[in-house]
Amino acid sequence: MSRVELFARTEIGCVRERNEDSFVVANITTGERGLRPGTTIQQLDESVGLIGVCDGMGGAAAGDIASKIASETLYDQLMMATALHEVSSVQEALLSAVVGANRAIADYAHTHPGKRGMGTTMTGALTYGHEVHIVHVGDSRAYLRRGRTLHQLTTDHSIVGQMVATGQLTPEEARSYEHRNVLLQALGVQAVIQPEIVVAPVCAGDVLLMCSDGLTGPLDDDGILEIMLRFDDPVRCCRALTEAACANGGPDNVTVAVARFLGEGLPIADERDPVQPRRSSHTLQ
């Protein structure tokens, strides 16, 4: 029987005074949440699993509160969703969660004037059958490792991300670009948002990685892939990735979530075939 093994880890890093990242790991079918046996190992044909990473921003304006609101709203909204029997209902539930989180953060900031300016990224994924369905706002990322190749599934909603997407910068040039941390989208700071939905089929042995930019700042994709190839187990992989980011200076909070897909019933990957996710953008308010 096919299954997914999940884990997540967050570290404050070496520079920040507090951790403004948050993550969520849950079994939406049973409602169980947290790093427990019922969530860290799930049968794909029986459960819909959730993993999410949120990177708060705002410093004194409470980025930690914004990311916590986002991760909790993501879980709560999906738990309230109608039965997730079709792809369309899965995507509708993910988009509703983004709208709910955006409003909840904005409402909190409105009633706490000292917190105005708080916001967060959100990258959340549902394991649904033999696919992952991702909703994404900001510059946290989702990757899929297939064999010895790492594929970035999401697009950075940042100035530098757009410049890479349009060919104005290479990924290597983007790492040292002056305005690389300027976001074009975040939850809680804009009435209108344009989340990205990404759907990717998974094969036996595939590994989904979701992370805040506290990982992708200190480590390039090759460095991330090298660690993922050394550590198959999600627990050890999460630990190794966060520790590597801290060893490289740890300039930001770092959060990673890993999902490994295993077992009979999943298609066998041919590494020569590229990962071909389906992407769509949605304008919501």
Image: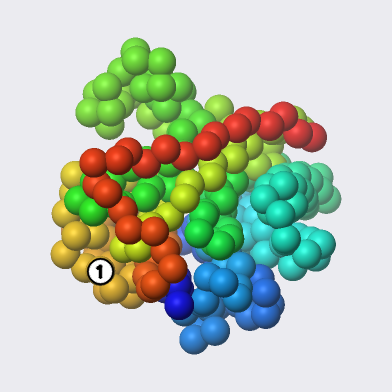
Residue 101 visible within the image? no
Residue shown at the point (51%, 77%) measured from the top left: 42
Residue 261 visible within the image? yes
The quarter of the image holding the N terminus is bottom left
Q: Quadrant of residue 126?
A: bottom right
Q: Position of residue 176 (x, y in %)?
A: 26, 28
Identified by mark 1, the residue type is: Asp
Q: Position of residue 189 (x, y in %)?
A: 68, 36
Q: Is 26 displayed left or right of 103 in the figure? A: left
Q: Position of residue 58 (x, y in %)?
A: 57, 44
Q: Is 271 displayed left or right of 189 in the figure? A: left
Q: Position of residue 134 (x, y in %)?
A: 55, 48
Residue shown at the point (39%, 59%) measured from the top left: 267
Residue shown at the point (39%, 72%) measured from the top left: 264
Residue shown at the point (37%, 41%) measured from the top left: 275
**Number of numbered markers:** 1
Q: Quadrant of residue 116?
A: top right
Q: Badge 1 is on which residue?
A: 232
